[in-house]
Amino acid sequence: MVPPDRCFGSTKIAYFVVTAISSLWVVACSAPRRTVIAVIPQTDGTMLWQPAHVGAETAVRGSGLSIYWNAPAREDDVEAQIDLVERAIDRRVAGLVLVPDQALSLISPVRRSLAHGIQVVIIGSPLPIPAGNNLSYILNDDVAAGHMAAQRLDVLLHGRGTVAVLGIDPDFMGIMIRERSFEEYLAQHDPGIHVVDREMGSFNFPQQQQIAQTTLRSHRDLGAIVALMSPSVDGALAALASMHVRQSVKVIGFDVSGWPLFDRNLNLDCVIQENTRLMGQKAVEIIEAARQHRPVPTQVILPPVMITRRSSDAAEVRWMFSQDWTLGRSKWSAQQ
């Protein structure tokens, strides 16, 4: 038989344990929930969209807000991105910053986000949904980007020659805008420069390289290539290297996913890059302003930056590509 004093001691210990656990539960349950903004780019681990993470983290520093960053493993994994948006809605995030992988497929998830009262900011390329009612856009000035490419081509070809346009993708309105702007500018200002080939783009690098090789074989006198998306840039440069094509064929690229390696790619003339770091920062600032019931813009247009061999080491370019991971990451948890 257990002595009464020992029984009382065990009971007392159990009482204190239960009380302590109850107190911890009360503290945990009464702790304020962290306000989370979900940022979901096209993919993770590239120098095109990682700077947007830095921009978002910079915007929330000291504000009490938290960034949840997640993305599909591939740019063309639309289903994975839709799933991430749905999970963000279910977790009742305060805001959603989205870089759509595909325009039409993301319409329904975005509308569902808006129906749940979530402030949504689309960055990069627009969706066919009008701005307003908790939806804002922060976009690259793709009209200006197309003009920049045409003006640069005029300098390279001295107003006369042929060019191929690679990477045309109807799934991205921004790409279509820059392509149309490019050709309209040439027609108005450089009638001596002719577009002799237009090829579709995708996120399949081997396919883009093969398309570039076929284009180069079909047009032996080609003066330049304008590649409207990152895989097309990489594919064109790889095709030129593998075919030992003369260095006079220059590549004007858009939105590269890594640092422009001009020394290793002599055919690369320039890159016209979206300022994704500033996009991420301004997107979070819009969401915070909306939470404080302050007026927010429905659309912000940011100018692209042309990067050349001479400007690749400029402070502005290094700032754009910054990936300062000391800012940290924020993961989903019960406390969030």
Image (tube, rainbow, N blue to C red):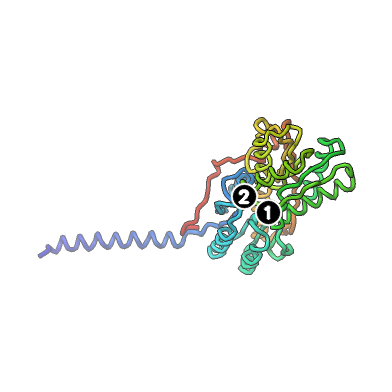
Nearest to the observer: residue 319 or residue 70: 70
Please provide percent x and percent y for residue 111: 65, 67
| Amino acid on which the number 1 mark rests in the picture | Ile
Label 2 SS: loop
Q: Secondary structure at mark 1?
A: strand
Which residue is labeled 1 in the image? 123
Whole-percent x and y of residue 263? 67, 30
Q: Distance from label 2 to label 1 (Cα)?
A: 23 Å
Position of 42 relative to 242 (above/below):
below
Q: Earlier in the sequence, mark 2 or mark 1?
A: 1
Residue positioned most to the bottom = 115
Q: Amino acid at mark 2?
A: Asn
Crowding around mark 2 (Cα neighbors within 10 Å: few <14, some 14 to 19, many 20+) is few
Taking the spot 29% from the left edge, 59% from the top edge, the residue there is 17
Res. 296 in view: yes
Q: Which mark is residue 204?
A: 2
In the image, residue 76 above or below residue 7: above
Residue 192, quarter of the rendered image = top right
Residue closest to the eye, 122 or 295: 122
Task: From the viewer's side, name the closer residue of 88 and 235.
Answer: 235
